[in-house]
Amino acid sequence: MSARSSTAHSVVEPSSTSKLVASVLVVVYALVTMIPLFWIVVTSLKSPPDSISYPPKIVFTPTIEGYCNLFTNQTRQTPEFLATLPPATTACEKVTRERNMVIVGPSNFTKRFFNSLVIAFGSTALSVFLGTIAAYGFSRFKVPLKDDLLFFILSTRMMPPIAVAIPIYLMYRELGLSDTKIGMILLYTAVNVSLAVWLLKGFIDEIPREYEEAAMIDGYTRLQAFRKVVLPQATTGIVATAIFCMIFAWNEYAFAVLLTSGDAQPAPPFIPTIIGEGGMDWPAVGAGTTLFLIPILVFTILLRKHLLRGITFGAVRK
Amino acid sequence: MTGNHIPDALANRLATATPPKLAARVRGLSDKAIAWLFITPTMILLLAINIFPLIWTIRLSFTNFRANRTNAVVKGIGLDNYTSILTDPDIWAAMQSTAHFVFWTITMQTLIGFTLAYLLDRKFRGHGFWTTIILIPMMLSPAVVGNFWRFLYQPQIGLFNYIISFFTGVDPSSFEMIGSVTLAPWSIIIVDTWMWTPYVMLICLAGLRSIPDYIYEAAEVDRASTWRQFWSITIPMALPFIMLAVLFRGIENFKMFDMVNLLTSGGPGSTTEVASITLKREAFEKWRTGFSSAFAIILFVTVFGLANIYVKALNQVKSR
């Protein structure tokens, strides 16, 4: 970047017309590509009849019905029965009463969302821990067959998830790990650790060895130097790696749908199964999708400087 | 790796020059011990959850084992699974769907992604902000978003059909993206392109930014036209990056499962049944564990082999 700005007046600076054309085209693309996401949020605020009207409604009265349906289970009751009930206290109760329904309890969504959180955090913590020490080992020490080991770590990512899922399914059944959060955490850690090692090795390679050497001359052992010199220097890299691992674990679907069914099921296999009366309850699906996507949006914005590195396993650095 | 010897040499020099107690602290745990201590846990985890299952898959692929009938006698049937896969027309149809999907997604993503990167490299005001906006789709869960595209693709009420009919005048209920045999393969290509074009764009952008200005300046001095500069400087110098993006997308899309499973789940019929969907059907619906294990091995060897050949080509382009 700095090299470019120093030649700001050179002949290679794009002309203002080409800049204008470029900006218009890019903005149009960006807006078009945002339409599906915009529609998810809009649908989550519609009532079920509004969501399936033709032509699709842009102007409508927003309602929290979708979110209510997402978080609660409801049953249909007769108006006479509803009349005997005490008046609705919460906003959700009011909305459901209008449709002759009563809330009978919370839905499974909260539990699935919580499972997603536990599995994502657990596997991220574990894979970043393992990844950091392994990356330090590969970065600083002479390891026999180093390149082969690193390639081996990367190649575990080339397996189609379904291919590994067959024996893992059998193995977990034997070990009693099927449909447990621990089983999913271990599995996602194994998938993520390859990314963590490759990314963190890149970050640690960039920290000059001289820092640790100086610390060791001052009387630190190798481990102390690692803890007190290298780790603080690698903080940015560790955080970026952690976010990448988190996003993967949060978004993963293939293993989740094959290896979990109830207790440990995270949100991605659950959201598509939200059904209302007479077909898909699209506002509820939209609500679940919106809530599920918000953390990722935040993380993407936090991570934008390191995105390139993360998605190429550290092969491209800026 | 010469760097490794410097701390050792330093430590030795210090050890001879300083009192024994300090010398022990300088050396601490030996570097070799630390290296193994640090690397082994990761290796054990990968052996347990990747390699051991892989070996198990290879073993199963030579048997008629079915995971839903654990009491049945498991017989070794040699290469029978492999021969029946290679002669199965359904498997070849799945490979063809996969090839169609991989080819078109990569072509469209490379074309659009490179164009966007080229435009963003004009560095107009606010280009950083718009880059971030464009990147959002690729960070989202393919399953959760793929599921929502099912709604956008509804004939009649779906937004996608509405927008198409708005611009072309075609009746929105006259075509079904997911339901029709001819359109369904394109419905998954559109979603994948929507999702992953930013990925190719980001890598291409890094490629374009890596071209030093002085090359363009020299070309200007030589009065090379913009067109000529594009084909003789921009494309060749960005090529390793474009190829890298194609490699990563190729591997990912070859094993594509989640988005397709939720959007079309292979249908209608088996028109969008890409390899991973076939694998899931064989393994977890028909429970032909041995057969699907063999198919899994064939897929893995194919990805691995193609990726290796491709990386060699990539290195040749890089070293040019």
Image: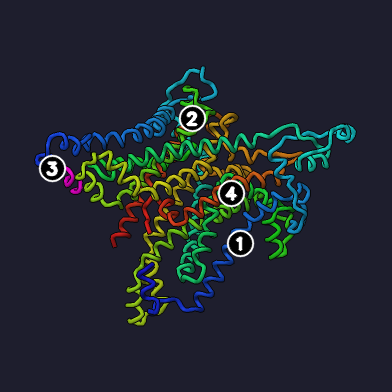
- Are callouts 1 and 4 both on one chain? yes
What amino acid does circle 2 point to? Ile
Q: Earlier in the sequence, mark 2 or mark 4?
A: 2
Task: Give the side of residue B11 with respect to residue B167, left or right.
Answer: left
Contact? badges 3 and 2 (CB < 8 Å): no
Q: Write the residue at 72% across / 32% down.
A: A105
Q: Write the residue at 58% across / 53% down.
A: B191
**Residue extent of the magenta highlight:** B1-11
Is residue B210 located in the magenta-colored stretch of the structure? Answer: no
Viewer-nearest of discs 2 and 1: 2
Task: Please state the horizontal and vertical placement of residue B228, each as a whole percent of the image.
Answer: 39, 76
What amino acid does circle 4 point to? Ile
What amino acid does circle 3 point to? Leu
Task: Please state the horizontal and vertical placement of residue B183, each as a whole percent of the image.
Answer: 63, 53
Q: Chain of mark 3?
A: B
* Residue ID for mark 1: A32
Colour mapping: rainbow
Contact? badges 3 and 4 (CB < 8 Å): no
How far apart, in angstroms, are the residues tagged by discs 3 and 1? 65 Å
Task: Give the side of residue A74 with respect to residue A251, left or right.
Answer: right
Question: Which quarter of the rendering shows the C terminus of chain B?
Answer: bottom left
Hey, which residue is sitting farthest right in the picture? A80
How far apart, in angstroms, are the residues tagged by discs 2 and 1? 41 Å
What amino acid does circle 1 point to? Val
Numbered badge on residue A182: 2
Q: Write the residue at 56% across / 35% down.
A: A115
